[in-house]
């Protein structure tokens, strides 16, 4: 029987590797490392504080494990957004303001949840969840 334990990672095809790495490093403190057995110019994995590669970045136009047409800059098809559990709500808001990035917020007091929505340089919508 297959049982899902957690989301492992998501993959982004990007035309702007440096900008995408900087976005996630500066906003979410993810650490960029070369993907195993891959050219770091083509593949970078972004690691969370728990040493898990939560985002895989592929330079647009490189081969994929599973071939699929990707149109950079377009919304992410049937995927509406990707959500991360986060800490540091006020610090994140300040980072977004300092960078002049558009974002939206949502509060759900009944479940003690504050949310920030922001898009990355590839038009991937992120939901950043902060539980109180």
Image (cartoon, grey):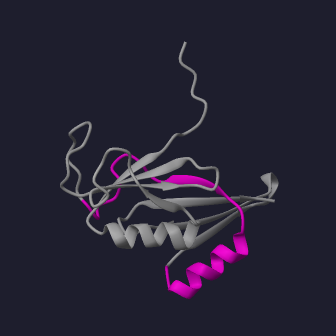
Magenta segment includes 83? yes
Res 17 quadrant in image: bottom left
Please tell me which residue is depicted at 61% across the width and 61% down the height of the picture: 128
Magenta segment includes 108? no
Percent position of residue 37, x then y:
32, 44
State left or right for residue 74 relative to residue 107. Answer: left
* Residue numbers of the magenta segment: 72-101
State left or right for residue 16 relative to residue 101. Answer: left
Number of numbered discs overlaid on the protein picture:
0
Please tell me which residue is depicted at 56% across the width and 47% down the height of the picture: 52
Percent position of residue 21, x then y:
42, 67
| Nearer to us in this view, 109 or 33 | 33
State left or right for residue 66 relative to residue 22. Answer: left
Percent position of residue 105, x then y:
63, 70
Quarter of the image with the N terminus is top right
Against 119, residue 46 (above or below) is: above
Please tell me which residue is depicted at 56% across the width and 53% down the height of the picture: 83
Please tell me which residue is depicted at 49% across the width and 80% down the height of the picture: 101
């Amino acid at each position: 029987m297959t049982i899902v334990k957690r989301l492992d990672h998501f993959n982004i095809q990007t035309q702007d590797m440096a900008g995408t790495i900087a976005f996630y490093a500066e906003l979410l403190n993810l650490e960029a490392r070369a993907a195993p057995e891959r050219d770091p110019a083509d593949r970078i994995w972004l690691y969370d504080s728990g040493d898990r590669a939560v985002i895989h970045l592929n330079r647009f136009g490189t081969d994929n494990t599973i071939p699929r047409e990707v149109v950079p800059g377009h919304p992410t098809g049937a995927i509406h957004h990707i959500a991360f559990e986060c800490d540091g709500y006020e610090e994140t808001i300040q980072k977004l303001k300092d960078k002049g990035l558009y974002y939206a917020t949502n509060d759900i007091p009944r479940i003690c949840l504050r949310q920030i929505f922001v898009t990355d340089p590839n038009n991937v919508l992120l939901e950043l969840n902060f539980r109180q």
